[in-house]
Image: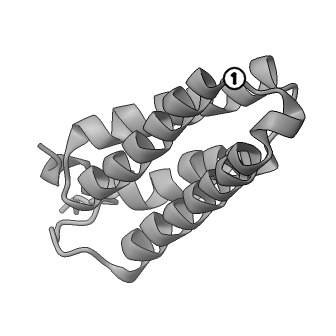
Amino acid sequence: MKEEYSYFDEDPKKGTGFILTIIALLLFTIMGLGIDIDEYVQHEYLNIPKWYFYVIFTIDILMVISLILMFFYKKIGIFAFPALLILHFFMHNYYLSTFLYTDVTNLFLFTGFGMLAIIPKWKFFK
């Protein structure tokens, strides 16, 4: 008899790996928000227009919301988070000529550890 193996988690309960992944993504998202706040405090000295901060803080808030949606098994969070993260990275790179290692690390965490924790739970996402 041939046994069938399932490599995906059959339990909708959020495991330690899933929770730690969301916490790590949230930590690096908050670090990026801290950089944005620091730039806002210095915006007159750095000659950054105010409209930029309306956009970048909106992106930061939407990234946190997408992580919350991921935690509650919503697929839109999985699609929105990397798109917003890349947009955040390119906004900093294009408008301020800053290369944010927090965004690069966050993207690595999402594609590496995040997918190891998220893909097995995919069938529970709505």
Q: Is residue 94 left or right of residue 117?
A: right
Residue at 49 percent across and 55 percent down: it is: 114
Q: How many marks?
A: 1
Disc 1 marks which residue?
49
Tell me if I can see residue 99 in this picture.
no
The disc labelled 1 sits on which kind of residue? Pro
| Residue at screen point 34% across, 60% down | 7
Which image quarter: residue 89? top right
Residue that appears at 18% across and 66% down: 10
Q: Position of residue 62 (x, y in %)?
A: 38, 41
As drawn, 35 above or below 79: below
Q: Which x, y percent locates residue 78? A: 35, 41
Q: Is residue 61 left or right of residue 41?
A: left
- Please say if 20 is above or below 119: below
Q: Is residue 21 visible?
A: yes
**Residue 82: percent from left, percent from top:** 50, 35
Which quarter shows the N terminus?
bottom left
Q: At 87% across and 25% down in the image, what residue appears?
A: 97
**Residue placed farthest to the front in the image?**
44
13, above or below 37, in the image: below
| Left or right of 75 on screen, residue 112 | right
Q: Going by the picture, which residue comes out furthest to the bottom?
A: 16
- Crowding at dot 1, Cα within 10 Å, few <14 / some 14-19 / many 20+, comes out as few
| Colour treatment of the image | one colour
Secondary element under disc 1, as helix, strand or loop, is loop
- Give the quadrant of the C terminus: top left
Most distant residue in the top direction = 94
